[in-house]
């Protein structure tokens, strides 16, 4: 069996999805997601110029060898662009494998370990009452877990992922449009004084059963994060996410020494080498890698297995930047993983997105149910794809009030 061709599409409804389609001499094709948020053309170029020419003629069933060929062959190892490109190929090869076996991917991993995978939604508010309304809307829809992000009084601009104005009813707020980044102003002091009380009020209002998550988005220093984590302990968060920028793996010790709040980290990681110490030293509770950014199913499954040895559960990244293909790859891992924790989930199911990526996967009452279609269980409509074109975007940058650059 041979790979005869591969095409890359960039574009989509409101997002520049990077979609790879690998074709074979047996008529079976595989699909993969290579969307690297706000740097989409780079993965596409890496695929087109360096990887696809080598793929032609390879046996698509040898997904492990192909992964090693590209990872070792790059010489300059890891990095988000290369790993997202390998991720797209790997996902497409697993899709082919599943279609050849006529089995959904979770069956190839070891079958189902649960009936449905718990997801969490994003509640946001310009202020606390606005946030409470947002949480209530998700609770009414049956969500069992909600991430809460709140505007901070006195902060000169809206902080991470919150709207400027109350009543906007949006579940995810970040305007990435344009090459020149938008700027936000951040003040850790105001945040640390306000947010623990806000979280306590949310717990009081919604009771003990709702799983409450919160994303610090890399904004605190390790000592500040330790203080914050200690203070929010009584709220019983499901997790506290990215309290510090996690490239300093040892910094997490400080937080652990002061608090038992569960820590989730890893959405910016792209290999097992970015999180092996965090996992082996049991400094985190949830690993947040995404199948696209971290080199595909082959590599992420290794991370999941390492995590399982150390009581670390999965909490895969699921921001809207991932296409339904990545979300499907994660859904199959979530159905199988003995150490599954939770899945971040933003409503992808707009009519435009469903038309571009038809699938029978479904979310109901806060649980994601993976379909039994062979492979990833998501298709791609090339005619629909022709409607979209690439639109440049950038992540915002963050400064302190005196102008010092900080972490988005
Ligand atoms: C999350 C993330 C996202 C990121 C975004 C960057 O927890 O979902 O923090 O909101 O900011 O994916 O590309
Ligand atoms: Mg996050």
Image (cartoon, rainbow, N blue to C red):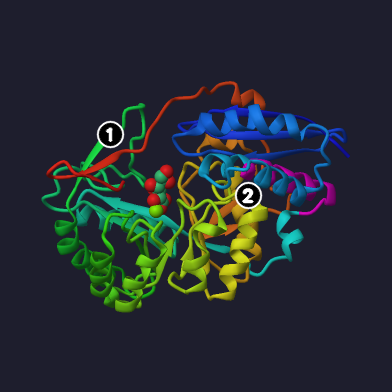
Q: Nearer the viewer, residue 26 or 185?
A: 185
Q: Secondary structure at mark 1?
A: loop
Q: Which residue is mark 1?
A: 182
Residue 80 belongs to magenta span: no
Q: Is residue 80 left or right of residue 145?
A: right
Q: Which residue is mark 2?
A: 296
Question: What residue is rendered at 49% in x and 51% in y?
Answer: 318
Residue 99 belongs to magenta span: yes
> Can residue 381 be seen?
no
Q: Nearer the viewer, residue 1 or 222?
A: 222
The crowding category of the residue bearing disc 2, from other C-alpha atoms within 10 Å (few below 14, some 14 to 19, many at least 20), is many
- Quadrant containing the N terminus in the rendered view: top right
Looking at the rendering, the stretch of residues picked out in magenta corresponds to: 86-103
The quadrant where residue 199 appears: bottom left
Q: Is residue 143 left or right of residue 270?
A: left
Q: CA distance from mark 1 to mark 2?
A: 31 Å
Question: What residue is rendered at 23% in x and 65% in y?
Answer: 224
Q: Secondary structure at mark 2?
A: helix
Question: What residue is rendered at 64% in x and 62% in y?
Answer: 302
């Amino acid at each position: 069996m041979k790979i005869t061709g591969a095409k890359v599409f960039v574009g989509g409804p409101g997002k520049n999805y990077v979609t790879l389609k690998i074709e074979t001499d047996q008529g079976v094709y595989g699909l993969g997601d290579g969307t690297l948020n706000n740097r989409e053309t780079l993965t596409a170029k890496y695929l087109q110029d360096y990887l696809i020419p080598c793929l032609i003629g390879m046996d698509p069933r040898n997904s492990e060898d192909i992964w090693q060929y590209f990872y070792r062959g790059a010489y300059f190892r890891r990095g988000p662009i290369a790993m997202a490109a390998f991720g797209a190929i790997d996902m497409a090869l697993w899709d082919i494998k599943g279609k050849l076996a006529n089995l959904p991917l979770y069956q190839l991993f070891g079958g189902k370990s649960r009936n449905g995978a718990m997801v969490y939604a994003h509640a946001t508010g310009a202020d606390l009452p606005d946030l409470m309304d947002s949480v209530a809307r998700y609770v009414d829809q049956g969500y069992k877990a909600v991430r809460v992000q709140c505007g901070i009084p006195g902060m000169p601009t809206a902080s991470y992922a919150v709207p400027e104005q109350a009543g906007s009813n949006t579940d995810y707020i970040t305007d990435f449009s344009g090459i020149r980044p938008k700027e936000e102003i951040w003040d850790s002091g105001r945040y640390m004084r306000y947010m623990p009380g806000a979280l306590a009020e949310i717990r009081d209002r919604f009771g003990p059963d709702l799983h409450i998550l919160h994303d610090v988005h890399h904004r605190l220093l390790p000592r500040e994060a330790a203080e914050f984590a200690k203070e929010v302990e009584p709220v019983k968060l499901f997790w506290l996410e990215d309290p510090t920028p996690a490239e300093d793996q040892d910094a997490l010790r400080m937080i652990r020494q002061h608090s038992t709040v569960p820590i989730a980290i890893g959405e910016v990681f792209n290999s097992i080498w970015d999180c092996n110490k965090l996992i082996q030293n049991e400094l985190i509770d949830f690993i947040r890698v995404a199948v696209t950014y971290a080199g595909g199913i082959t590599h992420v499954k290794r991370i999941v297995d390492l995590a399982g040895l150390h009581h670390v559960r999965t909490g895969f990244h699921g921001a809207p930047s991932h296409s339904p293909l990545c979300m499907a790859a994660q859904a199959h891992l979530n159905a199988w993983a003995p150490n599954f924790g939770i899945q971040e989930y933003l409503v992808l199911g707009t009519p435009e997105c469903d038309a571009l990526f038809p699938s029978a996967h479904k979310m109901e009452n806060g649980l994601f149910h993976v379909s039994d279609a062979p492979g990833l269980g998501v298709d791609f409509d090339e005619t629909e794809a022709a409607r979209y074109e690439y639109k440049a975007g950038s992540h915002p940058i963050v400064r302190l009030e005196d102008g010092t650059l900080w972490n988005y």
